[in-house]
Structure formats: C-alpha cells, structure tokens
Amino acid sequence: MSAARAMALLLGPIVALAVAACDQKQMAEQPKYKPYAPASAYGWDGSARQPPKGAVARDDLVAERPPEPAMSRPLLARGQVVFNAMCTPCHGRLGDGNGMVVQRGFPHPPSLHTDALRAASDEHVYDVISRGYGLMYSYANRVAADDRWAVVAYVRALQLSQHAPVAELPEAIRSRIGGGEGGQ
C-alpha cells in the first residue's frame, strides 16, 4: 500500500468526525444583524456600511441618460468605429442582422432597416444598447454613454443609406437611378 493511500485511509475518519462534531444548529442560531439594521457595535450607525459617495451600483450604470449630442462628422465617425467593433458581430456591417455569429448558427437579430426600428426614437435605440433587449445583452459596461449616442447616430446614417427618399438625392444620382420623382 502506498503512503498516500495509507494517509487517506487514516485521515478520512478523522475528517468525518470533525465535521460531525460541528453543531450546525448553534451556528444557525447565533446573533446576527439584518442588513442596514441599527447597530452600534461597529462604530457607525448600521450593521452594513453605506457605499462611498459617488458610488454607482452595477445595475444603475444606465440610470441616467446624458443629453443627445448634436449630429456631426466626428460623432458619426466615432459611431462607425464603435458600431464596427461592438455591433457588427451580430448585426453585420450593413445593420442587416447577418453578422459573423449569425453565419455560425446564432439567432438572427432584427435588421436595423425594418420600419419599426426606423420609426423608433433615438432614446429607444440608446436604451436598447444600454439595457439590452431580447437576446441582446446590455452594453452599458462595454460602451460609454457618449459612444452609445455615437452608435445611435451611425445607425441612423445606416438606415438613411438604405432608405433615402429619392427626392432628397442629388440630381446626378437621381438621373443615374432613373427615379427623378419622390418615393423611396
């Protein structure tokens, strides 16, 4: 018999006796404080410490929405960078819901070009990025609040790129596509 096996055979009953000697009832019935109950034993007024000033709970990261910035080229450029890094794996570069993870078997997210998502408010798109929706999880701890607004601006640009009214296109483009009159 090896020395390790002999030691295991010897220690097994000793450990079992030690565990059996613990009186679980006494441990469960010892004095305790409920969270935030009054208690002076610790040098402050409660049984639990208050969080430091300015601390934000993890779930409260999305509690405050900063104001939407004005549309600008730098905002769109930043939105494109963040969208390409964070959103294209699922939504694809065009926002059509055909990203790389979808091509490998993950469920299709909705296309960003659906009528419902084009009609959704900017705040709704921001909140979906912040809190998640359906199978999409929250990006609040991955994408800064200002960058979320940049992604919203870029999503709007993507949507406009696929659904621009013909009447708003420059004349040179309208003549090439043969749609000189309104519509989409």
Image (cartoon, rainbow, N blue to C red):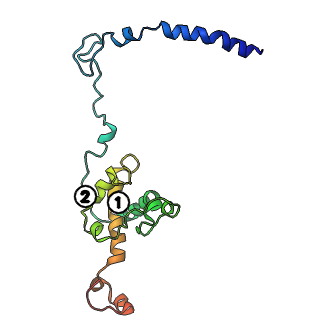
Q: Residue at x 32, y 77 (%)?
A: 163
* Quarter assignment of residue 31: top left
Q: Residues within 10 Å of mark 2 (few under 14, many from 20)?
A: some
Residue 166 badge? none
Q: Nearer the viewer, residue 134 or 147?
A: 134
Say what secondary structure mark 2 lies in. helix
Q: Residue at x 38, y 45 (%)?
A: 141
Q: N-terminal of the two: label 2 or label 1?
A: 2
Q: The residue under label 2 is which amino acid type? A: Glu
Q: The residue under label 1 is which amino acid type? A: Ala
Determine whether, in the image, residue 20 is placed left or right of residue 57: right
Image spot of residue 168 (x, y percent): 28, 83
Q: Pointer 1: what residue? A: 150
- Above or below, 180 against 144 in this view is below
Q: Residues within 10 Å of mark 1 (few under 14, many from 20)?
A: many
Q: Nearer the viewer, residue 52 or 128?
A: 128
Marks 2 and 1: CB-CB under 8 Å? no
Q: Nearer the viewer, residue 5 or 62?
A: 5
Q: Pointer 2: what residue? A: 123
Image spot of residue 82 (x, y percent): 42, 58
Image spot of residue 129 (x, y percent): 34, 54
Say what secondary structure mark 1 lies in. helix
Could one spot residue 98 in this view of the protein?
yes
Q: Residue at x 32, y 90 (%)?
A: 171
Image spot of residue 32 (x, y percent): 30, 13
Q: CA distance from mark 2 to mark 1?
A: 12 Å
